[in-house]
Amino acid sequence: MKRDLVPALGEAAGAVGHAAGDKPMVRFRGVTKRYGALTVLDELDLDVAAGEKVAIIGPSGSGKSTLLRVLMTLDPLSAGRIDVGGESLTHMERNGAWVPANDAHVRRVRSRIGMVFQSFNLFPHMTALRNTIEAPMRTLGLSRAEAVERAMELLSMVGLADKRDHYPSQLSGGQQQRVAIARALAMRPKVMLFDEVTSALDPELCGEVLNVIRRLGAEHNLTMLMVTHQMGFAREFADRVCFFSHGKILEEAPPQQFFTSPRHERTQQFLRAVREAS
Ligand SMILES: Nc1ncnc2c1ncn2[C@@H]1O[C@H](COP(=O)(O)OP(=O)(O)O)[C@@H](O)[C@H]1O
Ligand SMILES: [Mg+2]
């Protein structure tokens, strides 16, 4: 596979590593999200370095999906700010003042981010190939030939070049999820968000999706935030684990430390419950 399949991903971190003072790829500051009286994200701060892999775990309803959704700008913030690639996603400077970003600004900065959801949300009336070329043609202005070339490289990477003309209904859940990953990568994001991408899959199909994510991690310097219930995968793959509780990061640590000696009682209780269930 070509190293430049997803080019420019590694530039920020590069071979020289993270120089002191480097801006994080993703920065949350005081991020708050409320639905009515319910505070789902509570003045959250989080920095993710370029190329870093962060696993987000925690109980149901603790705000994990909301964190990814506000980063993808699918939901507006109630307060706080988010920067991506050293630039504000949520705000822009106008006449010397910071104001909420307009649509064009949001679209430009958000184009650095790709997301894959738990439910395989491919366009059902489009083939695997068409799903993968649509956005690059529409939003990046690629010619059909360019988009097809890019899509076929990505479909090959996820092991589905031979399924290019299949519709989602003709693919297994694991295959659909791999197309969804190829489709997100076709926009050449620097940051990939994965929200429980294996939760709806049979166990034997999980492995093929996790293998694709492993390859992405090994071969490209993508920054990744992944919500997962797969503790084994988080332990092996992530650089850092963040444990969510009530819209805050209660505890974060490198996986080895997190899984062997969690500090908080709530974290210990969660890990015990997960182990008992598996
Ligand atoms: N659109 C919405 N309207 C109202 N409440 C919501 C909405 N989306 C999420 N919530 C609530 O926010 C909380 C956090 O949800 P979510 O981020 O999906 O949690 P998690 O992914 O950790 O399970 C839950 O209590 C959920 O019911
Ligand atoms: Mg969720």
Image (cartoon, rainbow, N blue to C red):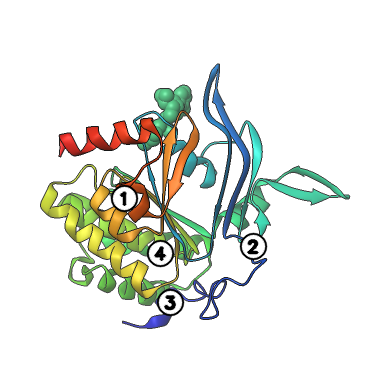
Classify mark 3: residues with Cα within 10 Å, few (<14), some (14-19) or many (20+): some
Q: Amino acid at mark 3?
A: Glu
Which comes before the other along the chain, label 4 or label 1?
1
Measure the C-alpha gap from mark 4 to mark 1: 14 Å
Give me the disc on residue 146. 3
Which comes before the other along the chain, label 3 or label 1?
1
Measure the C-alpha gap from mark 3 to mark 1: 21 Å
Q: Quadrant of ligand 2?
A: top left
Q: Position of residue 120 (x, y in %)?
A: 28, 47
Mark 3 and mark 1 in contact? Answer it, CB < 8 Å: no
Disc 1 marks which residue?
122
Classify mark 4: residues with Cα within 10 Å, few (<14), some (14-19) or many (20+): many
Which residue is painted at 61% across and 61% down in the image?
Answer: 85
Give me the disc on residue 23. 2
Q: Is residue 109 left or right of residue 64?
A: right
Q: Amino acid at mark 1?
A: Leu
Instruction: Examine the image and state in which quarter residue 16 appears.
Output: bottom right
Mark 4 or 3: the one toward you: 4
Q: Is residue 273 left or right of residue 80?
A: left
Disc 4 marks which residue?
185
Instruction: Examine the image and state in which quarter residue 220 appears.
Output: bottom left
